Amino acid sequence: MVSGAVQMVVDSKSKVETTMEVIRQRIAGRSLLPGGKLPSIRGFAQTLGVSPSTVVDAYERLVAEGLIHARRGSGFFVANQSVPLSLAEIGPKLDREIDPFWISRQSLEAGDAMLKPGCGWLPPSWLPEEPLRKALRALSRAEAPVLGDYGSPLGSPGLRQLLSQRLAGRAIECAPDQIILTESGTQAIDLLCRFLLEPGDTVMVDDPCYFNFQALLRAHRAKMVGVPMTPAGPDIDAMEQMLEAHRPRLYITNAGIHNPTGAMLSPVVAHRLLKLAEQFGLTIIEDDIFADFEHSPAPRLAAFDGLDRVVSIGSFSKTLSASARSGYITARPQWIENLIDLKIATSFGGGRLNAELVLSVLSDGGYRRHMERLRARLAQAMTQVAERLQAIGIAPWLYPQAGMFLWCQLPEGLDAADVARAALAKNIVLAPGNAFSVSQAARGFLRFNVSQSLDDRVFEVLGGQIQG
Amino acid sequence: MVSGAVQMVVDSKSKVETTMEVIRQRIAGRSLLPGGKLPSIRGFAQTLGVSPSTVVDAYERLVAEGLIHARRGSGFFVANQSVPLSLAEIGPKLDREIDPFWISRQSLEAGDAMLKPGCGWLPPSWLPEEPLRKALRALSRAEAPVLGDYGSPLGSPGLRQLLSQRLAGRAIECAPDQIILTESGTQAIDLLCRFLLEPGDTVMVDDPCYFNFQALLRAHRAKMVGVPMTPAGPDIDAMEQMLEAHRPRLYITNAGIHNPTGAMLSPVVAHRLLKLAEQFGLTIIEDDIFADFEHSPAPRLAAFDGLDRVVSIGSFSKTLSASARSGYITARPQWIENLIDLKIATSFGGGRLNAELVLSVLSDGGYRRHMERLRARLAQAMTQVAERLQAIGIAPWLYPQAGMFLWCQLPEGLDAADVARAALAKNIVLAPGNAFSVSQAARGFLRFNVSQSLDDRVFEVLGGQIQG
């Protein structure tokens, strides 16, 4: 039998414990968010039917545990050790230098004083500036609904008609109603991930692959497995083993020119890949945003497959404008119906003006001539940058047939993350290999965008680091 | 002991069963998708080490079960009874007439011959056409990066500066860096849902509420509870009970003029609501897209709360253009950091040209004058439509202080879904109450957009139905 005084201590101790437990549960259950304010002492005491001093004790012990903190004069707040969905904290911890988000943000935030050989797009002066200005002037005279009203759920019929014709040029046969316009290529893949994935599903990507695929898949809480790349496409034997072992739901890859390697799918790899996809019930997203850079089109999975289990996506951000963004999904008719509902729910109408602008530019003869000049300019830059990199000991993994990317190996022993860190201190944004590699197997690689690598300073700084 | 022949039958039966089971599992595990092609008979027989006739038997029995179907000459396909994420199939089954998706799609797909009293936006001729044309002409002369390059992750500094000033006019104090631009108001809420919700979380909405909140929350697989509306905001006593019973993570509501009811938050309701939010650890998204319609601003939760647990979102689709879409999120600084990563992952840069267009229009004196005229025009239309509706027995629930919506009750006994179905046959798109109601408690209501209800035919058709 315990004495009254001891009983009182036990009671009040258990009330403090209980109060602490309620707070812990609210934080764990996310009804109290990191950074969120805790209930007021008086109010919470009333809610729980305990004395204010019990709540004070409980809060102070939670402060000592680091779970909450006090802010002078304004109350108690949940500590910030975790946030609801911090993408940077899903998946393995990476050096900031090889974190996919970091490279995107560095490139997007870089001022004019920065050089950006690591960024994934052309300098604005390489884009079809005159056709864009002309299209904007034409838009300023458009009918009122074009200027002010929502578009139809599928998006501009004129642009979809034109895209259907352009896709036929890559042997992808589809009716305009099998095309749904989106606000960007990224949004197209995001919409498809919403449609096709559940949290925890496994997705196969190329290793290396475009780093934002990884960022996007993290946002969908998908698991990733990487299939090694060869110059003719993914390594099919490795892919078969991965399909056996991991049964991924989805494979996301580039059509035509692969980012970052510049590899191009061969017909035999395409055929074997689609046989495996059928065998393992794999759906494929083929990201076809670099099509207009090709001198002659590589085989498309979507063409071989007839849009059965392959979905093709495209955009104009790389060739036309990243400011007036517009993308699209090409898929089997039945999926388009479901994608319309998802598009309305998550972005309502959207993108009509940009779609009209893209249609206007694409319909203009000036765009075709611009692209011809651009392909020649990129080929020239590719030769020049490859030579200058080789001169300082940086070797292209392959010499791409087209496009803007050179995937290069550093001299033995150098870590691309170190090189990128040092270069950033000199106002140069690089793209180190492991940002592209799910298996972190590319620490000796860098991706160069040849259109952003023509400044002497790039080679001076890199050369200095390699020799130093 | 079984004879050899019987044993053989048993074996082959169990092989067929096993084969069927493998297919069932692939469908259940979604490695075979609805509409997807089954493995070829020969290939699958080889994979499983059974005879082709076993696979044929298995497939034919699955056809009989309705799980798959045969398409002449092209093989077997998974039946379409369910799709990966069919929004229409999440949540309760609704009549097509009161399905949130259906109203959006009807309104978005409606041709010029349709009247749309049920749609949620102004006719294009009510938008600031001349300021938009002027802004497009100005854009056609902008510097190359404005035309072609990605924007910074937060979006146009000029527009964020201006928004910060405009928010101060509603007593919402925030630095420009607490504002992140999005591609629309819907995308703003979607981004916040990604950040704040897990599948299965409960979200509180108003009952009735803007129907696309429900569509969006279905896409996030959230549960919904609805708090009844009063003319001064949500019913606070009911809200307290719901918070106790359901512990929702999030409350999504309108700022200022409520959609669909036209209700306006009173200061006392705002204060009690925020006290409850603190007590129950509730985060609030305040959707402030109708601000420019107000004659004088109603209290904002975001202003009272100082952007602690309230996030404010806005857009220009209702007042400026739904073709050049642009939206924004205003939140506490720490959340903005996480939202940047999510925005990059799911839509990369995005929306620069539209943001510049919006900035140009908002900075133009013509826009302010246009909005003054528009408010007067809406007030006039409100009077006129309310009178004409009352004349045929349709009674406004309240007479809104501003905006474009009239929430109206049909004569006793009429079901708004029936009325909407009959009106659609006469090329009039209505918005029946239950599309807005989580609890399906608004079958006698319709929402009218007064700017889209000025045609005599609206009242002729409705009047005919009410008397008929």
Image (cartoon, coloured by chain):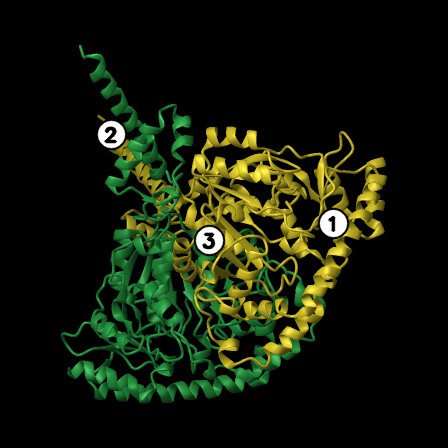
Chain colours: A yellow, B green
> Residue B100: x and y, percent?
32, 64
Q: Nearer the viewer, mark 2 or mark 1?
A: 1
Q: Nearer the viewer, residue B246 or B43?
A: B43
Q: Tell me the residue at 25%/73% (across/down).
A: B420
**Residue B133, picture quadrant:** bottom right
Q: Earlier in the sequence, mark 2 or mark 1?
A: 2
Q: What secondary structure is found at the residue carrying circle 3? A: loop
Residue at horizontal 84%, vertical 44%? A388
Circles 1 and 3, Cβ within 8 Å, touching? The answer is: no
Mark 2 lies on a secondary structure that is loop
For disc 2, the chain is: A
Q: Amino acid at mark 1?
A: Pro
Foreground mark, 2 or 3, reads 3
Residue type for callout 3:
Ala
Alpha carbon distance from label 2 to label 1: 77 Å
Mark 2 Cα shell of 10 Å, populated few (<14), some (14-19), many (≥20): few
User: How dense is the environment of label 1, judged by Cα within 10 Å: few (below 14), some, or many (20 and up)?
Assistant: many
Please name the amino acid that badge 2 sits on. Answer: Ser
First in residue order: circle 2 vs circle 3: 2
Disc 1 is attached to a residue of which chain?
Answer: A
What residue is pinned by disc 3?
Answer: A331
* Of residues A15 and B166, the one drawn nearer to the viewer in this rendering: B166
**Percent position (x, y) of residue A291?**
63, 53
Residue A117, numbered circle:
1
Q: Nearer the viewer, residue B344 or B93?
A: B93
Seen in the image, is B250 located left or right of residue A294?
A: left
Asked if residue A447 can be seen in this view, the reply is: yes
Query: Do callouts 1 and 3 point to residues on the same chain?
Result: yes
